Image: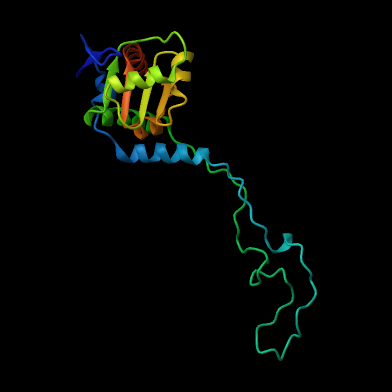
Amino acid sequence: MKLDVVNIQGQSTGRSVELPQEVFGIEPNAHSVYLAVKQYLAAQRQGTHKAKERWEIARTTKKLKRQKGTGTARAGSMKSPVFRGGGRVFGPKPRNYSFKLNKKVKELARSSAYADKYNTGSLIVVEDFQMDKPSTREYASILSRLNVAGKSLLLTSEHNANVYLSSRNLPKSQVFTVQNANTYDIINADVLVISEKSLGQLKAAYENQ
């Protein structure tokens, strides 16, 4: 499995890289991807929602009407859930939505996400580059020359402050180190751009498992 390496001008460098078979050559497992994405989104939830129940409502406890003879149901408190402004029955309470996922499942999900990008032709390998200063215009120009449309994710071998700051103002662009990329970020991107050096790091990480 080989892929041509391009420069930031969108031109071929004449080199190609060998993609690790254990990452990009597997059959994508949709269910593991689903579980990994579900876990990520669940962990983003604050879980601070709260509705007042009957005992928490501050309303009068005076009996509203006589017990019998009204032709309607008996009522003894305005706190009752049947009245407007009353307590809520089985309302939401603060809770933690996160859940555990096995390490092997998360690894399979991430590999499946990489393989999906390769299979759909949404993977670009670019040679390592630096930016002298943060420039959103310059970074947008690089993406344009790479023919990247829609949401993009750039994976670098190490944190580059100038590249990160340049991409931060673009709502459909993200930059992460290859170690910090998760399944959701990879799947959510329309195009995955990975630097040549970070591809080597990715291969080494899977070989050491």
Rendered residue at 80%/74% (across/down): 62
**Image x and y of residue 44, in percent:** 52, 38
**Image vertical order of residue 49 relative to residue 168, above or below:** below
In this view of the protein, can residue 177 be seen by the observer?
A: no
Specify the farthest residue to the front. 137
Of the pair 126 and 66, the residue shown nearer to us: 126
Relative to 46, is 170 on the left or the right?
Answer: left
Q: Is residue 127 above or below residue 69?
A: above
Looking at the rendered image, the quarter that the N terminus falls into is: top left
- Quarter of the image where one finds residue 56: bottom right
Q: Residue 164 vs residue 118: left or right?
A: right
- Outermost residue, bottom side: 69
Q: In which quadrant is the C terminus drawn?
A: top left
- Residue at image point 28% right, 19% down: 145
At which x and y percent is residue 12?
A: 21, 12
Q: Quadrant of residue 113?
A: top left
**Residue at figure coordinates x 27%, y 34% from the top left:** 28
Q: Total marks drawn?
A: 0
Expressed as whole percent of the image width and height from the top left, the position of residue 54 reads 70, 64
Given residues 14 and 61, the one toward you in this image is 14
Q: Position of residue 69 (x, y in %)?
A: 71, 91
Q: Is residue 14 above or below residue 76?
A: above
What residue is drawn where x is 31% and y is 28%? 191
- Left or right of 9, for residue 130: right
- Camera sees residue 129: yes
For residue 83, which quarter of the picture?
bottom right
Q: How is the image coloured?
A: rainbow
